[in-house]
Structure formats: structure tokens, C-alpha cells
Amino acid sequence: MEMTFVGLLIIAILAWIVARLVICSKSGSVVFSHELKLFAFFAYIMLLVRGVYFPFTSPDGRLVRMVVDFEQILPFNINYSAFTFLRERYPGWWINVFGNIAVFIPMGILMPFYFKKLNSFWKTLLAGFGVSLFIEISQLALYDRCSDVDDLILNTTGAALGAVIYFIVRKVKQK
């Protein structure tokens, strides 16, 4: 199975519109500012999906596709060894480290902002860990990607930093 990001984006936007129409019709009202906030979170998630599942470069310059090939995924490509980037300095290792942290900082800020049940640092941290774990598990189906414990640690660190920012700002605003 192959899919481009544009194809996935079109499907996701259509599903988003249908879901929001159903939800709004059941509630009987539409709060534009709320819908705009939710769409901003949706856009962030789609950017995250773009970075996680679709490589940014293509050797031949063509549109990159996400390929799921069940005949090639076994054995799974998993790195269980934590902090390999400290031992194995590969070109661009620091972009990987700081990128994995930076991409999840908005997650730590946005989740408690949009989802009121994530009303503590620990709940937000656990939710960020859960999203990162979902990403790493879902990458098992992509033979050209690697599920990495380092990504799980770094992404969770980014979510934690974002949560710290959110809860500090919230506390300052309350005073």
C-alpha cells in the first residue's frame, strides 16, 4: 500500500469536516473560536504526521510516498538501546536530538490548552508519552523507518518542556 502525504491530507481534512459537522449538529451550536482552536491543533497534528511518516527528501526528486509492505516489515526495525546518539555520532545527530524535543514542545503546550482533562503536568506528560509511543509502534509497519526508544525519550522530554511552559504561564496569568 502506498500513499502520498497530499492524499492522506485530503482524506484527513474530509474526515475532520464530517466529524466536526456531526459533533456541531448534535450539540446544536457552533463556537467559531473553539472550532478555530481545534483546527489549529489538527493542523499541528498533520504537520507532525508529515514529519513522522513521510521522509523529507527523495533521491529522485519525486513526491515521497509512505509505503506499507507487509512482506518486508519483519523483522521489525527497532532500537531498544537508549541514548545511542551519545555513543554513535552520525551526521546530523544533533538535528535528530533537538528536532525530536522541539517537535513535541507544542504538544505539551497545546494538549492541556485544548483538553481540559489534562489539567496537570503529569497528565500532560503521560499523554505526550502516549502519543509518542503510538507513533513509534505505528512505525513498525513501515519497513524503511525505525522505531527508536531515543525518540520516545526525546519526544516525551519535549512534551514535558511544553507542559512546564503551559503550566507556568497559566499560573502567572491566574495571579
Image (tube, rainbow, N blue to C red):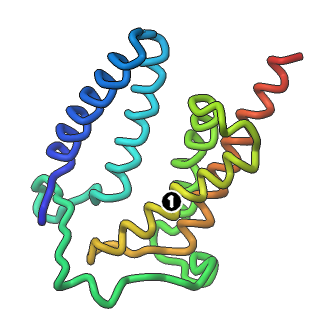
Q: Quadrant of residue 67?
A: bottom left
Mark 1 surroundings within 10 Å by alpha-carbon count, few (fewer than 14), some (14 through 19), many (20 or more): few
For the point 35% across and 50% down, which residue is it? Answer: 49
Q: Quadrant of the C terminus?
A: top right
Kind of residue sitting beneath label 1: Ile
Badge 1 is on which residue?
A: 95
Q: Under tag 1, what secondary structure? A: helix
For the point 66% across and 55% down, which residue is it? Answer: 126
Q: Quadrant of the N terminus?
A: bottom left
Q: Indicate whether 144 appears above or below 1.
A: below
Q: Is residue 173 left or right of residue 16?
A: right
Q: Is residue 87 left or right of residue 74?
A: right
Q: Exactly how many numbered labels are in the figure?
A: 1
Residue projecting furthest to the right: 175
Residue nearest the viewer, comparing 78 with 86: 78
Give the image location of residue 37, x and y in percent.
48, 22
Q: Quadrant of residue 78?
A: bottom left
Q: Quadrant of residue 40?
A: top left
For the point 37% across and 42% down, which residue is it? Answer: 47
Q: Indicate whether 141 appears above or below 165.
A: below
For the point 16% across and 59% down, which residue is it? Answer: 65
Give the image location of residue 133, x and y in percent.
52, 64
Residue nearest the viewer, comparing 173 with 32: 32
Q: Indicate whether 125 appears above or below 11.
A: below
Give the image location of residue 111, x and y in percent.
58, 38
Give the image location of residue 82, x and y in percent.
62, 79
